[in-house]
Amino acid sequence: MHIARYALDGCVHHGIIENETTIARLQGSPLEGLNRSGAIDALAAVRLLAPLHRPRVFGLGYNYTAHSNESGKAVPQLPVLFMKPSTTVIGPNESIVYPAEGQNIHFEGELTVVIGTQARHVSEANALDHVLGYTCGNDVSDRVLQRRESEFGCLLAGKGYDTFAPMGPVIATGLDPARLGILTRVNGTVRQDGNTSDLLFSVPAIISYLSKYMTLLPGDMIMTGTPAGVGPIQVGDTIEIEIEGIGILRNGVEAEDRRDTSHP
């Protein structure tokens, strides 16, 4: 099943994509249940949005051995965690904003877990019971700032610019997260070709580990790490993250506009 969040006629809805032409609208958020409203919307008439509005976003670093090797890092002995602000999240076909002071901004294609029910102190065996589904994610990163922060044991700003977490195009349910192919293309050229079978810490292990220390909430999104092949992006590029069973997340890159947008 593919669950979409979309805009239509000035309103935002959630729905289930039934085929290539129609979406069955839900009564509310999929986190509240997959209750159909009875309305059917034309897929061609809607604009797909980020699967959830401003969720909490957890990230993992160095969760593929090959990526650790290309980064010159030791393979971690426990999950390397960070968080991205909710304002990093954008949807399909929205633009990644290249910061005015950015020097080396990278893409990172990742399987992203969507938590469906509250989870605390869950076992690996029961962890997937708390998952609503999965989506594509792009953990966009400012490498220069990231490395400066990491020297002092923290990681926030380098991962936290607005638009630095594209998500979508849908939440896919019923997938086995242990064996999913991940492709990243930049301007049509394949740059990453990985598989979640190579995850150092599996999806159940990540969920169980996080829930040991904090309560996971419905709507939380967990980016599970990126395969080898990360690289720079430039203004004008088009980045595509494709994960089997989910679809293609596509975003362009545009230059930052420094005009003050803090007031209406």
Image (tube, helix red, strand yellow):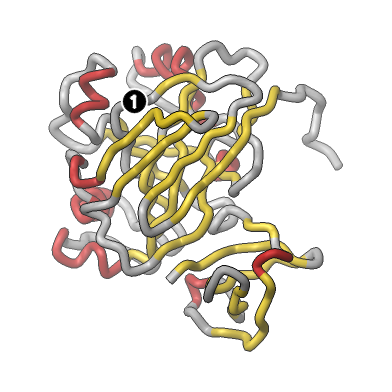
At 42% from the left and 36% from the top, the residue drawn is 184
> On the picture, is 216 further left or further right than 67?
right
Q: Would you say residue 212 is visible in this rendering? A: no
- Numbered disc 1: secondary structure: loop
- Asked which quadrant contains residue 258, the reply is top right
- Asked which quadrant contains residue 223, the reply is top left
Check the picture and name the quadrant holding the C terminus: top right
Q: Mark 1 belongs to which amino acid? A: Gly
Please state the horizontal and vertical placement of residue 153, each as a whole percent of the image: 33, 20
Report the residue marked by disc 1: 229
Q: Would you say residue 238 is visible in this rendering? A: yes
Is residue 251 or residue 34 the one in the foreground? 251
- Asked which quadrant contains residue 225, the reply is top left
At 21% from the left and 62% from the top, the residue drawn is 122
Is residue 181 or residue 172 the one in the foreground? 181
Please state the horizontal and vertical placement of residue 7, each as a whole percent of the image: 71, 62
In the image, residue 83 sits, relative to residue 256, either above or below, namely below
In the image, residue 151 sits, relative to residue 116, either above or below, namely above
- Name the outermost residue toward the bottom: 38
Check the picture and name the quadrant holding the N terminus: bottom left
Please state the horizontal and vertical placement of residue 182, each as a whole percent of the image: 34, 43
Q: How crowded is mark 1: few (under 14 residues within 10 Å), some or many (20 or more)?
A: some
At 34% from the left and 25% from the top, the residue drawn is 229
- Name the outermost residue toward the right: 264
Please state the horizontal and vertical placement of residue 98, each as a whole percent of the image: 62, 23
For the image, the number of numbered tags is 1
At 22% from the left and 60% from the top, the residue drawn is 121
> On the picture, is 218 further left or further right than 92?
left
> On the picture, is 130 further left or further right than 202?
right
